[in-house]
Image (cartoon, rainbow, N blue to C red):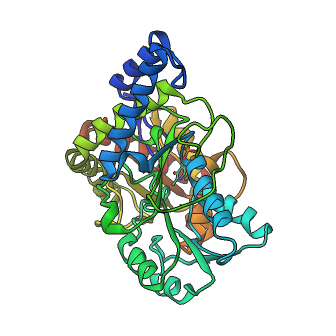
Amino acid sequence: MFVYLDNSATTKPYLEVVEVMKHYLEEDFGNASSLHKMGITAEKAVKGARKIVAASLKVKDNEIYFTSGGTESDNTALFGAANALKRRGKKIITSKIEHPAVLSACKRLKALGYEVVYINVDEKGLLNIEELKDQLDPNTVLISIMHANNELGTIQPLKEIGELKRRQGIAYFHTDAVQSYGKIRLGLEEIGVDMLSLSGHKIHGPKGIGALYLRSGCHIEPYIYGGGQEREFRSGTENVPAIAGLGKCAAMISERIENNAKKISDSRNYLLNGIKTEIKDIKINSYEDERCLPNILNISFLGIRGEVLLHMLEQNDIFVSTGSACYSKKKGQSHVLKAAGLTDKEIEGAIRFSFSEFNNIEEMDHVLYHLKNSVENIRKMTRKW
Ligand code: PLP
């Protein structure tokens, strides 16, 4: 049995997405800027996808800009806003557990003379909202707080942050919704965000495609200059097959959010309960209630190295992660688990299980069986337990 539980790293594309992409690669392969009918067909595909993504967020079509993914959307939002607002103020507020797409951009902005404040989180990754409130001042021009964390699944109180932003007259509020988009419903108007990043490959769509929602009236500088595509905001020939694929998966996942959330959390909770009863000396790092996405579960298996467990599971065709895919090939500890205050041992033994609608209970029994055996074997081998 093959069990893929690394859906926060990337997801299996829907078959329908692959078919749509194939069509725009093999047949309607025109350039969306061409004046002839092949160009017009390609342009139509881009327009249709924009409509679907906008509808899924309940925003206007012209507030959606296609990018090469979550990383570019985050960079565009941060550098674009910082540049546009530099005369008004130079303070940016973010959190300690953002994705590197935000943290590395912030590091660069700091080097360019901006003040960046990193807000702390609790032991399961929930933002300290009081600390954020205390940091808001007239010099603050941008708040960038992720909607849900990619390692722990913790959902941040965006609505509260949006209210604070409004009350204090802060210029812009950006959220990285790469992990939450398509998993839980987002009411953008209610939240009050000005910019939102999303990515195709986390929702059974193609890699290398994403979008930035930019509220109309919110003016930021472009990040990529060139031929003036995407209404002069994001140049570069439109990746029509990927954009059409993103439109397809956005439409499919939007229809299924509630059903998926139920199905996915059933798998998650079944595995969690099984682990709790079958395996001792564990620490549950994710929230076990509505503060966590339905599809993420982070657990530390004490006394073992997560990487060793990952490879043992892999031998049985079970695929998990020790944390974010971005860190797995780099040396060093997860900055997210560190910020949540986990001990070195807890970080070392951490495994992230991330689920999708393609998982089922039978798979969870299979995972539990191999997980229990693997943990016991590793503990026996290392003679620490
Ligand atoms: N933001 C978050 C929270 C993510 O989890 C990821 C990908 O793992 C990204 C941004 C980057 O998105 P992309 O892979 O589309 O560049």
From the top left corner, tell me how far across and down residue 354 is, in percent.
41, 47
Q: Nearer the viewer, residue 87 or 131?
A: 87
Q: Residue, x 60% and y 47% (percent of image)?
A: 72
Q: Quadrant of residue 2?
A: top left
Q: Residue, x 65% and y 62% (percent of image)?
A: 103
- Above or below 109: residue 161: below
Q: Residue, x 30% and y 53% (percent of image)?
A: 58
- Above or below 33: residue 58: below
From the top left corner, tell me how far across and down residue 283 is, in percent.
44, 66
Question: Is any atom of residue 357 visible in this view?
Answer: no
Q: Quadrant of residue 19?
A: top left
Q: Nearer the viewer, residue 112 or 12?
A: 112
Q: Nearer the viewer, residue 140 or 263?
A: 140
From the top left corner, tell me how far across and down residue 338 is, in percent.
60, 69
Question: Is any atom of residue 54 visible in this view?
Answer: yes
From the top left corner, tell me how far across and down residue 331 is, in percent.
72, 53
Relative placement, left or right, of 131 versus 56 is right
